[in-house]
Image (cartoon, helix red, strand yellow):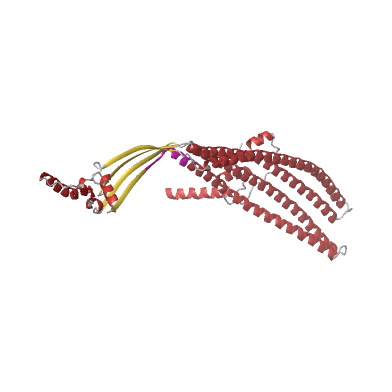
Amino acid sequence: MKIIIGLVFSIVFLNASAVTSSLPITMDKAIVILKAQNLEIKTASLDIDSAYTDLDKVKGMNWGKLDFIQDFARSDNAGNAFGFKLTSREASFGDFGFSEFLNPLGQAIGGAANDQMPSDMSGLLGVEPKDLNYPDARNFFQTKLKYELPIFTGFKISSYVEIMKSMTKMKSLEKEQVIDEKIYQVKKSFYDMALLRESTKNLNTILDNINTLENMTKSMIDVGYAKKVDLLEVQAKKGNVQRLVLQMESNQKLLLHYISFLLNQKVNDITTPTEDIAMPICLNKDILKENLDIKKATQGLEIRKSMLNVSKSAYYPMVGGFAEVATADDSFLNDMNEHKAYTVGARLTWNIFNGGSDDADIQKSRLQHLKMQTQVQLAKKGIALKIDKIRTEIETFDNEVASLEKELILADAIYENYEGRYKEKLSSMSDVIIKQSEQIQKILELQMAKNKRNERIFALKKLANGEKR
């Protein structure tokens, strides 16, 4: 019974979810989904995570490295075989060939005791020890732990850390740019959909009137007040309007597909906005302060500064410490405690002369730093130009909207006048339809002008990083 009840609740929940997902999505809801589901935003987030791992990697260089080394070898090379024994603390005098040296030495000592000392004993030093030169093959197993620590690197590691910190900030700024761009595209798509739907609605109104005119023309042909060519003209205009309606509906489907792509989920319907966007109240200096392109250029300048410090590190000495502990034998891990050894030490390396290459690297880094300073100034000038351009365009569209609103008032009055004249049999239906078409055209022109104005406002907000703030 519990299982059946659970299944019933699951089915009800799934059906409720299906109903919810089929509801039209508002623009605010779409932006929430966009931030959570958009694939490009997710990719940008992964880039930030990758930058943080690079930062951790560079920071880890300050702690040095610890290596475990296990050697397995077998050799009858004289140097290796003797070195293996010496490393495992098992070398003996016999390894030096003393067995071959003591026999003639004993004979010489015996002869000296019998007053038979040879006149020249230098031949003893010419004896070649076979045990040392031709040793038996020997196994070598060495287990070693080695730790190396950079003590001073001429500020190279710290400069690399600063570079990677700047890179993480750069990736964060790039993610903000992606979010702002995608929000801009979503908002523009919603307002484009509003324009398409308004256009389709008005075209359908025209189509209804043309259908009325078509039926009237047919009736007039029956009574001899119109010709067949009049009907063909009306039907041709009807076909043209139907084609435009189909194009508008197709564009709506394509726009829904694009919104689905942005949100990374299927979107069947949306709720289009009806209000116009208010002009944001922000000064140019505030926009320049918050602009992401300028912030990225500034971070690039910090990176170039740190890279200059990396180049300068070539003039400093490098100091490193090391320590190792090892054990070795001719069998694996045999008598480890008896054969263990350690080594500790430090090393200073200072490049005195490098043919001027280090100085050339520093000069190149300085030039890149100066170039980046110029690019920051260029970014500020370019963004300021964009701001002025967008503000001018918004002002132009404001004037266009005001003019079209007046033209629409006139078109409405003319249409109402012709509609009244038609009722009084002073004008034809075709005249009324023409005036209505002109009226609807003004409505569409006004809607398009408002959409263009809204799009420019969105662009201004994007420059000011307005969505983030």
Q: Is residue 352 above or below residue 426?
A: above
Left or right of residue 25: residue 329: left
Main secondary structure along the magenta-highlighted residues: helix
Determine if residue 218 is in view: no
Residue 64 among magenta residues? yes
Residue 367 image point, x, y percent: 60, 40
Left or right of residue 200: residue 76: left
Left or right of residue 71: residue 130: left
The residue lying furthest to the right in this view is 426
Give, as a single range, the part of the protein colored magenta: 55-66
Residue 22 image point, x, y percent: 59, 50
Q: How many marks?
A: 0
Residue 183 image point, x, y percent: 62, 44
Q: Residue at x 22, y 53 (%)?
A: 130
The residue nearer to you, when weighing 255 against 322, is 322
Determine if residue 144 is in view: yes
The residue lying furthest to the left in this view is 114
The residue lying furthest to the front in this view is 119
Left or right of residue 71: residue 23: right
| Quadrant of the rendered image containing residue 281 | top right
Residue 37 image point, x, y percent: 55, 47
Q: Residue at x 47, y 39 (%)?
A: 352
Q: Quadrant of the C terminus?
A: top right
The residue nearer to you, when weighing 122 against 356, is 122
Residue 259 among magenta residues? no
The residue nearer to you, when weighing 237 against 122, is 122
| Quadrant of the rendered image containing residue 244 | bottom right
